[in-house]
Image (cartoon, grey):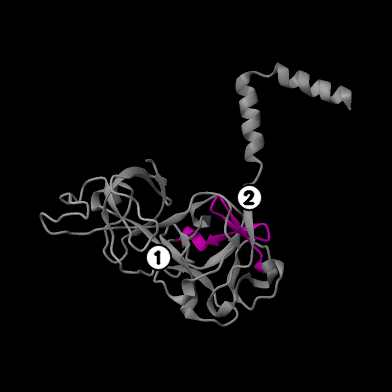
Amino acid sequence: MAARRTSLLLVLRSLSLGALLTLFATTLATVPAAAATGQITGLANKCLDVAGASSADGTAVQLYDCNGTGAQQWDVNADGSIRALGKCLDVTGNSTADGAKLQLWTCTGGSNQRWTVTAAHDIVNPAANKCLDVSDNSSANGARAQIWTCTGAANQKWNAPASSGGQEQCWATHYGPQPAGALTASGEVFDNNADTAATSLSRQPQLPFGTRVLVTNVANGRTLTVRINDRGTFAQTPQEPKCLDLTDGAFGRLGGVLNPDAGHIVVTQTVLN
């Protein structure tokens, strides 16, 4: 054993600093991030389930009575993947369309296998900006899981084990058209193209005026630093928790689509001061 340790030390000493860094990075990359494991329950307190407990690529993902089997044990990972039976929750055909069905598939790291579990009990595919949904709002065993525009309805609400990695994620919306000369709550004249934002009144704690916040769009990785100069509305939305109202300019620079009916993105926020 001592001879083997000596040989390993000689090998390590012979490597350049760059080679050592590459070796350590490769070793770390093979260690999976911590995952939270358990059932994902939804409509009628039924479970997200892999049909027939089959691990074959293309197996349907459905709603089913909770039974404690491996077909209903999901790993919610810090890398955004949700896995069962060693494979990933996947949107069929890499589709972003309403009604695209979910299946089990070999993990590829693709955007159709990335999910965000929000504090509002939505499970969102950021690439499609759509929610994990039970087809036809059906609570029958075998009802297919799909993606659909987020509505806040009961067939889109899930209780999932919380991942231990990553920052808290929330919803950011945008102002839309405002009257000329409108003032923010801080007293500034509103500029809908500035890198500023309102902190939502439905989210606690409130951020003080002047706070600089690094905002990251989870779907595309774009970041922007905004300054808090306003307060949001009291209105509760199906996409709660909403943390920020961004100006239209800031929202667009983060890659958001300026649509008053679907104008929200999943973000992380990091307070800088």
| Count of numbered circles on the image | 2
The amino acid at mark 2 is: Ala
In the image shown, does 195 or 204 lie closer to the viewer?
204
Residue linked to disc 2: 34
Residue drawn at point x = 25 percent, y = 52 percent? 247
In the image shown, does 109 or 34 lie closer to the viewer?
34
Residue 267: numbered disc:
none
Residue drawn at point x = 65 percent, y = 29 percent? 23
Image quadrant holding the C terminus, namely: top left
Residue linked to disc 1: 240
The amino acid at mark 1 is: Glu
In the image, taking residue 8 as reference, residue 262 lies left or right, namely: left
> What residue span does the magenta drawing correspond to?
72-95
Give the x, y percent position of residue 115: 50, 57
In the image, taking residue 267 as reference, residue 187 lies left or right, namely: left
**Inter-mark Cα distance, 1 to 2:** 26 Å
Of label 1 and label 2, which has the lower sequence position? 2
Give the x, y percent position of residue 49: 62, 70
> Quadrant of residue 90 in the image?
bottom right
Q: Residues within 10 Å of mark 1 (few under 14, many from 20)?
A: some
Q: Secondary structure at mark 2?
A: loop
**Can residue 3 be seen by looking at this rendering?**
yes
In the image shown, does 140 or 227 lie closer to the viewer?
227
Give the x, y percent position of residue 225: 33, 42
Residue drawn at point x = 63 percent, y = 23 percent? 19
Q: From the image, state whether disc 1 or disc 2 is nearer to you.
A: 1
Is 11 placed above or below 104 here?
above
Image quadrant holding the N terminus, namely: top right
Residue drawn at point x = 42 percent, y = 63 percent? 130
